[in-house]
Amino acid sequence: MSQGKALEFSGDEMRAMGYRVIDMLVDYYESRAERPVAEKLDFDALDAILAEPLPRAGRPWTEVLQQFERLVVDTSNRVDHPRFFAYIPLANNFVGVLADALAAGFNIFNAVWLQGPGAAQIERLTVDWLRQLFGLPAQAGGAFVSGGSVANLTALAVAREIRLAGDIEGAAAYCSDQVHFAVSRGLRLLGFRREQLRKIPSDDDFRLSLPRLRAAIEQDRAAGRKPYCVIASAGTTNTGAVDPLDDLADLCEREGLWLHVDGAYGAPAILTERGARSLAGLSRVHSLALDAHKWLFQPIECGVVLVRDRRWLSQTFGETPEYLKDMRSDGEERNFMLQGIQLTRQFRALKLWMSFKVFGLDAISDAIAAGFANAELAEKLLRAAGCWEIVTPAQMAVVTFRYKPTKGDEALAEPVTHDLVGRLLDDGFAFASGTRLRGRSVLRMCCNNPRTTAADLENTVALMTQLAIELEAAHRDLPASG
């Protein structure tokens, strides 16, 4: 190879490397459904990574690529697999993959308008398309960020600045006990104490309870505290529950509170008829966080933060040091370095823009709708199996359930349900995750991958049923403790 001090390769070498990478990706995508969701791990090989010394001399590219394939690809859970139902599956698309390669290959710096005006305009356009989809007003705006955690953090920083002018003493924010932990972590990073976030016990449907929320706000006002923000969920990770957004918007208007919605995976469901019904009121929020790498099928990372007035972003983050004074601006929010935490930032919007252009909104909407249908089929199959209790029915592509022992022995339901996650990982054919609801272990399947087939669901439920029955028998054979 010709690489040396200039860190360069010849044109032929670069083409050979690129073709090899594309071949690897295409081979993976074409065989993905036949591969296991998880591979058996060789812990000795993984531990050996930590013993590798810092290389002084280079190695052949093909050798390093093979090492990557063996140590990274072959040991990772395949979160884009059609039978990966754990957490929120990340089913990307090949257009987005190529867009990421283009953004990285051309090394596009999308922070200062002067350095990449075309990239800035495409990000502004893509943000505006999302603004329109969610029904936000014309003055709304936003920016692409790494993911939901930073989108939530950015929105909460804006709320702190606009509602509190940075004075957080005595301020109180409110959410349900089902909110994603990124919210509480984000508030702590912004200087709030843990007790300043009031986690309201959710209602019977695991949604933010309006009566309990009103009572908490009244109690805080009476105690001299400053209620300022309600944080709602548009599709919780645990159950897919959507908080009552319209009612919360009414309450926030009456109380003068900021309404932020964590729509990390659920918000794009607005592109479907049933999703739009569930998300009624989303157009009334002050800020919204979403992950396009979830239900908009983009490669990781692709988060977005939207705010009701785009000027709030520059009011919160706008600082221009001396060495950037020559940035050109006509008063519009063109420079993304002034609209968020990052100065050096990737051109993340490219992959969503290209996906919208190549596939069209109708195809993306159909792919989202498939998630609803798959979760409903999963629920139907679980009920038909006869040994599962549906804890929360299918909603926003999520269904949760719990093992129902064959002889009605409720004491066995807990260990079997809990242990099944590990058995699924060991088996590798499919994977569903576990969580806890009202103090009980439950399993959850998120079915938002549009490549999941009816056969995938049928075979997964059959496998879970078989493994659960085996676990029940094993637990019955265990000697009693004590």
Image: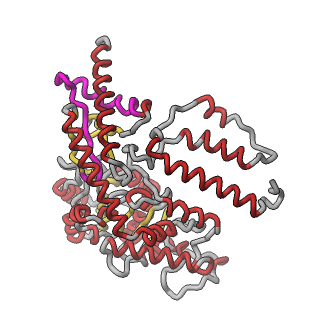
Counting labels gives: 0
Say whether residue 44 is magenta. Answer: no
Q: Is residue 131 above or below residue 374?
A: below
Q: Is residue 386 above or below residue 359?
A: above
Quarter occupied by the C terminus: top left
Residue drawn at x 63%, y 81% as measured from the top left: 325
The residues colored magenta run: 395-424
Say whether residue 423 is magenta. Answer: yes
Between residues 162 and 121, which one lies in front from this camera angle? 121
**Image coordinates for residue 22, horizontal then vertical, percent:** 60, 56
Is residue 165 visible to the viewer in this orientation of the structure? no
The image quadrant that residue 287 belongs to is bottom left
**Image coordinates for residue 40, horizontal then vertical, percent:** 51, 32
Residue drawn at x 71%, y 37% as measured from the top left: 52
The image quadrant that residue 294 belongs to is bottom left
Residue drawn at x 32%, y 14% as measured from the top left: 478
**Image coordinates for residue 120, horizontal then vertical, percent:** 53, 76
Between residues 54 and 462, which one lies in front from this camera angle? 462
Q: Is residue 274 left or right of residue 265?
A: left
Residue drawn at x 58%, y 68% as measured from the top left: 343
**Image coordinates for residue 62, horizontal then vertical, percent:** 71, 47
Between residues 79 and 237, which one lies in front from this camera angle? 79
Q: Is residue 231 left or right of residue 84?
A: left
Is residue 418 visible to the viewer in this orientation of the structure? yes
Q: Is residue 180 above or below residue 112?
A: above
